[in-house]
């Protein structure tokens, strides 16, 4: 399959693609961990990129579409992760070991059922996850269905521990498909070293 034979679609503010059999780097965060005005600012910065993509419809433009999409993804993730690591806004519920363990156990529970789990990191207000979706009924499970199951279960269980109701996770997750072994290794290192980069520990093993 060509690297360009995918569907490019927007859900809320982010582009999402899912080539069959691909491995994905996913970041999902707690509700209100980024203020709405900040999210809107990032969305506005991506409007020009989206307009460029809208004007590129021919086969010869596929490489350029990919380059523009990468600019959107890199810019959004760079802003998102820097903001989340600061932990300056919203809840930091995952600092509670009970809630972090609930998320960790759920990630392991779905391993080999819905996806192959490669690496993950649970921060105070977000989770980094590296998975390869598995097949069911002859087709690969969608990221949307996987994240729905994971978020629904962990939201319910974490809310019980917090004695609260309502949304726990932000509605949309960031995702990026990993293109080769070099990027896979780089992504694993990034996930494992996120707590170090955020100043929470001195080495990832901690």
Image: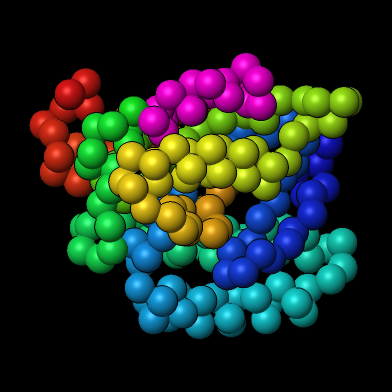
User: Which of 131/30 is in front?
Assistant: 30
**Compared to 77, does 123 lie above or below?**
above
Please say whether residue 27 is visible from this viewpoint: no
**Residue at 67%, 47% in the rendered image:** 144
> Residue shown at 58%/81% (left/top)?
47
Residue 191, position as x, y percentages in the image: 36, 35
Q: Residue at x 22, y 27 (%)?
A: 204
Residue 57: image quadrant is bottom right
Instruction: Give x and y (percent) for residue 75.
Output: 45, 64
Color style of the picture: rainbow
Magenta residues, start to end: 102-120
Tell me: residue 17, above or below residue 149: below
Q: Does 80 sit left or right of 87 as displayed?
A: right
Q: Residue at x 67, y 81 (%)?
A: 51
Q: Residue furthest front?
A: 163
Q: Is residue 9 left or right of residue 130?
A: right
Is 32 drawn above or below residue 156 in the view shown?
A: below
């Amino acid at each position: 399959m060509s690297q360009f034979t995918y569907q490019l679609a927007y859900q809320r503010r982010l582009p999402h693609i899912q080539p069959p059999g691909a491995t994905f780097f996913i970041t999902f965060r707690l509700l209100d961990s980024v203020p709405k005005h900040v999210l809107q600012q990032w969305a506005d910065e991506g409007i020009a990129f989206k307009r460029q993509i809208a004007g590129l419809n021919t086969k010869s433009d596929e490489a350029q579409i990919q380059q523009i999409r990468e600019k959107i993804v890199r810019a959004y993730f760079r802003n998102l992760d820097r903001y989340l690591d600061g932990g300056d806004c919203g809840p930091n519920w995952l600092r509670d070991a009970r809630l972090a363990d609930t998320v960790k156990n759920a990630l392991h529970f779905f391993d080999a059922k819905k996806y192959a789990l490669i690496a993950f990191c649970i921060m105070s207000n977000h989770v980094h996850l590296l998975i390869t979706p598995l097949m069911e009924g002859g087709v690969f499970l969608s990221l949307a269905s996987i994240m729905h199951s994971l978020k629904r279960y962990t939201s319910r269980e974490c809310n019980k521990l917090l004695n609260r109701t309502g949304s726990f996770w932000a509605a949309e997750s960031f995702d990026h498909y990993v293109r080769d072994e070099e990027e896979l290794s780089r992504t694993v290192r990034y996930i494992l070293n996120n707590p170090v980069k955020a100043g929470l520990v001195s080495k990832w093993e901690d």
